[in-house]
Image: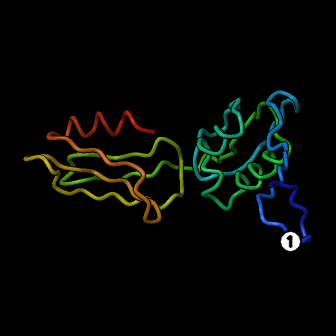
């Protein structure tokens, strides 16, 4: 025996009661046009107009990991669901890339974009014999881990990452 479940109504008869509710959780891309935003962020290309979708914006400009205006733009754009964002990260000439030297001047690391993000780099012995592992960490979260036997191999793997 089956019947319809109605919230707030108790059924006396045993059986299965179901209630199916359909919702629209997504608006098809392209229905809301294009929007352009100038903003500040702690990651991403600077002073360049970049066409992205909302997901690419979040990843490219660290929108969820910053308290700068990129976070507000991401939340605002997600509500309107435009088909495309024209993103423009504003930065002054004072914006610098972060750098780090590992070992005795053997490997110089430099971030891809100007940033104020607090990265930590850990160098440790790799699992395989005669290898080293370099880990990039931010706020206790491992962002990248590469393992190689030579400095040149480590540099190539690090350069291939974002």
Residue 57 lies left or right of residue 75; in this view the side is left
Q: How is the image coloured?
A: rainbow
The percent coordinates of residue 24 (x first, y second) are: 84, 42
Screen quadrant of the N terminus? bottom right
2 vs 61, nearest the viewer: 2
Residue ID for mark 1? 12
Q: Residue at x 44, y 60 (%)?
A: 141
Residue found at the very far left of the displayed protein = 129
- Position of 34 relative to 138 (above/below): above
Characterize the local packing of mark 1: few (<14), some (14-19) or many (20 or more) Cα atoms within 10 angstroms: few
Look at the picture and state if 40 lies above or below 60: below
* Total numbered labels: 1
- Percent from the top left, x then y, of residue 59? 59, 43
Query: Farthest residue toward the top?
Result: 30
Q: Is residue 107 left or right of residue 117?
A: left
Q: Quadrant of residue 3?
A: bottom right
Work out whether residue 9 or residue 130 is closer to the camera in this orientation and state it: 9
Above or below, 159 against 144 in this view is: above
Which is more toward the observer, 47 or 152? 152
In the figure, residue 146 lies in which quadrant? top left
Q: Residue at x 65, y 48 (%)?
A: 92
Q: Residue drawn 83% across and 36% down?
A: 27
Instruction: Report helix, strand or loop for mark 1.
Output: loop
Residue occupying image coordinates x 39% and y 51%: 99
Relative image position of residue 53 (x, y in whole percent): 71, 34
- Image x and y of residue 14, in percent: 78, 65
């Amino acid at each position: 025996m089956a019947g319809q479940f109605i919230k707030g109504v108790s059924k006396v008869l045993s059986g299965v009661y179901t209630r199916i509710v359909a919702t629209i959780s997504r608006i098809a891309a392209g229905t809301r046009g294009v929007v352009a935003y100038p903003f500040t962020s702690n990651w991403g290309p600077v002073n360049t107009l970049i066409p992205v979708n909302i997901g690419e914006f979040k990843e490219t400009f660290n929108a969820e990991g910053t308290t700068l205006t990129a976070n507000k733009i991401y939340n605002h754009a997600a509500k309107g669901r435009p088909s495309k964002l024209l993103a423009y990260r504003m930065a002054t000439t004072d914006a610098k890339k972060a750098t780090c030297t590992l070992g005795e001047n053997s490997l110089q690391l430099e971030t891809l974009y100007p940033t104020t993000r607090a990265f930590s780099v850990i160098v440790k012995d790799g699992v395989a014999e005669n290898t080293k592992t370099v880990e990039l960490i931010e706020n206790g979260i491992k962002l990248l881990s590469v393992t190689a036997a030579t400095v040149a191999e480590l540099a190539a793997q690090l350069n291939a990452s974002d």
